[in-house]
Amino acid sequence: MRDAVLAGPTPAEIVALVRLAEQGSGVPPHLTLPLIAKGWIMITADGAALLTLAGRVLVERSQTVDLERLAGVPPTLATWSASPPA
């Protein structure tokens, strides 16, 4: 997981964080552990995902990114899968 932390955010992670911040959407299950490990979210006792300060900064910086242009990121949480698109 250390290498993932050093690599920085992936497009899917940015989209998940922005959706969490703007819509309160849940975090896709396959991204939960990486986002926790990177310090961008924390999980409350009732299982809700919350942005950390570092996660909030990343979301604010991502406002300059055209999220619609990030390839392979489905618009709804229900269509996320554990495996990346081919």
Image (spheres, rainbow, N blue to C red):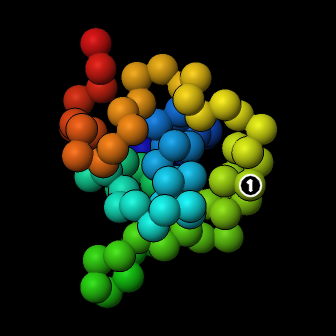
Image x and y of residue 77, in percent: 30, 48
The answer to whether residue 61 is left or right of residue 20 is right
- Type of residue at label 1? Glu
Farthest-out residue, top: 86
Say if 52 sits above or below 14 in the image.
below
Residue 51, position in %: x, y?
Answer: 55, 68
* Count of marks overlaid on the render: 1
User: Which one is in front, 9 or 12?
Assistant: 12
Quick check: 34 above or below 71?
Answer: below
Q: Quadrant of residue 5?
A: top right
Q: Residues within 10 Å of mark 1 (few under 14, many from 20)?
A: few
Identify the residue at image location x=46%, y=37%.
Answer: 12
Residue 67 lies left or right of residue 75; in this view the side is right
* Quadrant location, the C terminus: top left
Query: Which residue appears at 70% of the width and 34% of the height?
Result: 65
Does the rendering let one see residue 4? no
The residue wearing badge 1 is 60
Secondary structure state at the residue bearing disc 1: helix
Is residue 31 visible from the viewing direction of this image? yes
Vertical order, 60 against 44 (above or below) = above
Q: Position of residue 30 (x, y in %)?
A: 28, 46
For residue 72, side relative to residue 77 (left or right): right
User: Which residue is at a point 48% across and 20% down the rendered structure image?
Assistant: 71
- Which part of the image, by quadrant, shows the N terminus? top left
Q: Residue furthest bottom?
A: 45
The residue located at (23%, 29%) in the rendering is: 83
Q: Position of residue 42 (x, y in %)?
A: 46, 71
Query: 7 and 62: which one is in front?
Result: 62
